[in-house]
Image (spheres, rainbow, N blue to C red):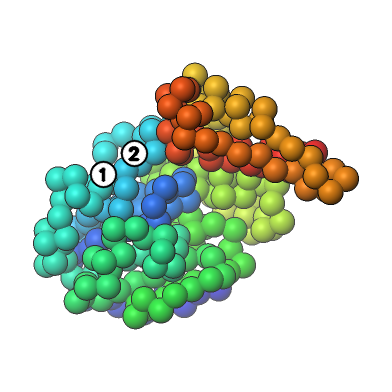
């Protein structure tokens, strides 16, 4: 365990209400970190809200079946959040990634906390818990759950498994270490179902998403003697296929296979 969680333990002991947020166009690590932290805090008897700057992408809605993640400006305003005591920013420490929630964080008068694994960092005037060697923020949340002696429920196991699996490209990125698999073993033991997670993520696309990807792949150009691959997508492509911006996620990785 690389982070000293004692300051966060004290913050949680001293406060009752918590607001969680993450970056726009949230991925599974962002959503998983929010949902997992919410479960941990509620297990400890705390009150929690999750509010992001934009909606959960359609292809990830299965990840939040209870619709815990709220969207600023859609039934919740900045004024509704002013009385909360602690604000946690998860899986980012960059102002530009927060979108509309950036202003909420900047004007927040309570305690600010950042939990993140990215190297880049803006000054959010927060208590920062960061490990840039970690493969996912989800693994940091797992470490925190263990530090708080919170029992891993099947839901918590599945959420955090998904966060780590997706942020490591299903364990093919160089960030993967022995510690990754030791963490995953704990999550599977808690109830995570890897085949079900994979099927939900990659085998339930909309036809619009598939058609958009066909256009993106059809636009590939090879430059510099094959050393550079580029492609593009247009507004017309979105309009004609009925796809949404989140449907471009990960498609660029196909070019890396050449």
Residue 27 x, y percent position in the rendering: 46, 47
Instruction: Confirm or deny contact between disc 1 and disc 2 (CB under 8 A).
Output: yes
Please tell me how crowded label 2 is: few (under 14), some (14-19), or many (20+) other residues with Cα within 10 Å: some
| Residue position for label 1 | 68
Q: Quadrant of the C terminus?
A: top right
- Identify the residue at image location x=28%, y=46%: 69
- Identify the residue at image location x=29%, y=58%: 100
| Residue position for label 2 | 64
Residue 77 image-quadrant placement: bottom left
Task: Decide if residue 43 is in sight here.
Answer: no
What numbered label is drawn on residue 137?
none
Please tell me how crowded label 1 is: few (under 14), some (14-19), or many (20+) other residues with Cα within 10 Å: some
Q: 22 left or right of 182? A: left
Q: Is residue 111 above or below residue 241?
A: below
Q: 162 left or right of 145? A: right
**Secondary structure category for the residue under label 2:** loop
Residue 240 x, y percent position in the rendering: 46, 22
Residue 110 image-quadrant placement: bottom left
- Identify the residue at image location x=36%, y=64%: 89
Residue 179 x, y percent position in the rendering: 64, 59
Task: Decide if residue 122 is in sight here.
Answer: yes
Q: Quadrant of the N terminus?
A: bottom right
- Identify the residue at image location x=26%, y=66%: 103
Q: Is residue 252 above or below residue 175?
A: above
């Amino acid at each position: 365990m690389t982070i000293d969680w004692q300051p966060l333990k004290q913050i949680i002991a001293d406060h009752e209400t918590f607001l969680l947020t993450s970056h726009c166009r949230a991925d599974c690590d962002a959503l998983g970190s929010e949902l997992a932290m919410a479960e941990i805090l509620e297990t400890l008897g705390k009150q929690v809200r999750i509010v992001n700057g934009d909606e959960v992408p359609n292809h990830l809605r299965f990840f939040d079946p209870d619709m815990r993640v709220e969207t600023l400006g859609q039934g919740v305003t900045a004024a509704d959040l002013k009385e909360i005591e602690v604000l946690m920013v998860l899986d980012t420490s960059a102002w530009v990634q927060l979108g509309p929630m950036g202003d909420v964080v900047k004007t927040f008068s309570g305690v600010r906390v950042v939990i993140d694994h990215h190297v880049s960092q803006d000054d959010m005037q927060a208590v920062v818990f960061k490990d840039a060697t970690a493969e996912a923020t989800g693994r940091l949340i797992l470490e925190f759950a263990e530090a708080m002696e919170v029992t891993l429920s099947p839901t918590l196991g599945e959420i955090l498994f998904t966060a780590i699996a997706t942020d490591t490209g299903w364990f093919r990125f160089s960030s993967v270490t022995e510690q990754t698999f030791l963490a995953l073993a704990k999550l599977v033991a808690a109830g995570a179902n890897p085949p079900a997670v994979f099927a939900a993520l990659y085998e339930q696309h909309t036809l619009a998403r598939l058609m958009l990807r066909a256009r993106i792949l059809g636009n590939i150009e090879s430059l510099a003697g094959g050393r550079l691959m580029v492609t593009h997508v247009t507004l017309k492509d979105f309009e004609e296929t009925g796809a949404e911006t989140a449907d471009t996620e990960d498609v660029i990785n196909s070019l890396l296979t050449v």
